[in-house]
Amino acid sequence: MSVNYGAVTGGTVIGGTTAWVNGNILFEALTNNTTAPIDVVYTFNVTTPSTTPSCPIVPVNQIVTVRVQPAAAFTTTNGAAQICSGSNTNITLNTGVTGAQIRLQSVSYGAASGTLANGAMFTDGQKITEVLSNNTNSPVTVTYTFEAVVGGCTPSGTQSVQVIVNPNPSFTATNNAATICSGTATNIAFASPTAGHQINVVSATYGSVTGGTVTSGVTTYVNGNSLIETLTNNTIAPIDVVYVFNVTTPGTTPSCPVSTSNQSVTVRVLPTPVFTFTNGAGQICSGSQSNITLNTTISGAQVRLKLVSYGAVSGTLAAGALYNDGQKITEVLSNNTNAPVTVTYTFEAIVGACTPSSIQTTNVIVNPNPTFTATNSNPNICSNSPTNIAFSSPTNWP
C-alpha cells in the first residue's frame, strides 16, 4: 500500500509497512495548515502473506481519498469605530481560506437599532454597512461577534468588533427677551440633553448695534448657559440683531451630526427715545390757544405729557396724553384772575416699554383779559370848568 499526505501533517501510515486485518480501523488526526483543502490519498490491497505463494498473484488496489479541510481563519477591519446616529458601519470581513465563510455569531445593539440577525453569513471581502440609529442622548456601543466556518467543521475562535454610535445632539435656544431697550441685556437660554454637546455660534449680525461680545466660530455654550450681553442702539430706528447657532459633539470622531442644522434667534434692539419741542407762544391772552409743537425722530417713539400744572388757569389736558412726531398742543387756556398765570407742561419721550427719556419743561404765560371802569363824576360842566372822569381796573401786570 501507499499513502500521499501532501502538505497535511499528523499522518502515521507507512506505505508497505502498515497493515490491517478484519475489524481494524484507520484512525489518525490530520492537520491542514494551508488555506485550501488537501486530498490525502490512501492506496490499499489485500494479500495472504502466510501462504506460498501469497495470493492473489496480482493484487488489486483500492484507493481511498480523504479531503482535509483547512482550519477556518479570518480577519476584520473596522473602518468606522465611531459613527453618528443614522450613519453606516464599515466593517470589512476577510478570510484567505478556500471555501470558508464568516458567520455573525451574535450582535448586541443595546439601545441602538440595526438590521442584522445572528447567523448571517459573509464571504471574503464582504462589508457590513448597515445604518445604525441611536435615539438616546448618550453614546451606545454595538458589539458584533464573528467566527469563521468551513463546511461542517468546528468554527474558528470568535472575534468581536465594536462600533460606538453617537447620538445626534439636539438643543433649544429660548429667547426670553425678544425685544430689548437700548442699553439693556439679551437673555437667550440654552438647553441640550445630549452628552458631550457644544452649542456653537455660527454667526452674529449686529448691524449698527454696539456692545456685542459674541464671536462667530469662537463663542460656545453648553446646557444651562445663557447669552447675556448689553446692547446699545444709538440710531433712530429699531435694529434686529440675528444670532445663528448649531450644536455638535466635538469630542467624538466624527463630530456629530454629520450635517449640522442651524437655529436663528432674533433680538430687536429699540433706539433710545429723544424729542424736541417748539413753544410758538410763550405768552398768550386768556381764551387763546397754546402753540407747542412736539417732535421726535425716533421710529416708534411718542412724546408723553408727564404732567401739566395749570395753576388758576383752566385747560383740557391730563397727564399721560401721548403725541406723535409733529403733533401740536393747541388747547384754549383761560385765566379768569386779575394777574398772569404760568402754565407748565412737562414732557418725556417713550419707545415701547423702555425707560423714558429725560424730561423737558415748557411754560406758557396766560395773561388775563383786563377790565376797567370809567366813572364820570361831572356829567355836566360849565364852560371853562374841568371834567372829572375817574378810571379803575383790577387787572395786575408785571
Image (cartoon, rainbow, N blue to C red):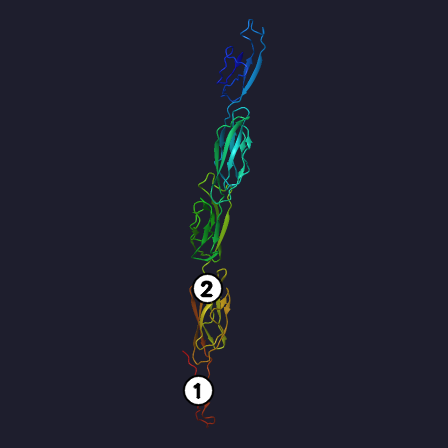
Instruction: State the SS at label 2.
Output: strand
Q: Is residue 154 above or below residue 221?
A: above
Residue 124 location, x and y as percent?
54, 28
Residue 108 location, x and y as percent?
50, 38
Q: Is residue 93 above or below residue 113?
A: above
Residue type highlighted by circle 1: Phe
Residue type highlighted by circle 2: Ala
Residue 375 appears in the picture as rendered = yes
Residue 242 appears in the picture as rendered = no
- Please state, as top left, top right, bottom left or bottom right, where the C terminus lies in the image: bottom left
Mark 1, residue position? 391
Closest to the observer, 74 or 229: 74
Residue 176 location, x and y as percent?
47, 55
Closest to the observer, 113 or 231: 113
Residue found 57% across the figure and 14% down from its top: 63
Closest to the observer, 100 or 257: 100
3D distance between C-alphas at marks 2 and 1 = 50 Å
Choose mark 2 or mark 1, whichever is in front.
2
Which callout, 2 or 1, points at the residue further toward the start of the chain?
2
Q: Is residue 192 above or below residue 116?
A: below
- Please state, as top left, top right, bottom left or bottom right, where the N terminus lies in the image: top right
Spot the residue most to the top. Answer: 52
Spot the residue most to the left. Answer: 398
User: Within the image, what quadrant is residue 357 found in?
Assistant: bottom left
Mark 2, residue position? 349
Residue 165 location, x and y as percent?
49, 40
Q: How many marks?
A: 2
Q: Is residue 157 above or below residue 216?
A: above
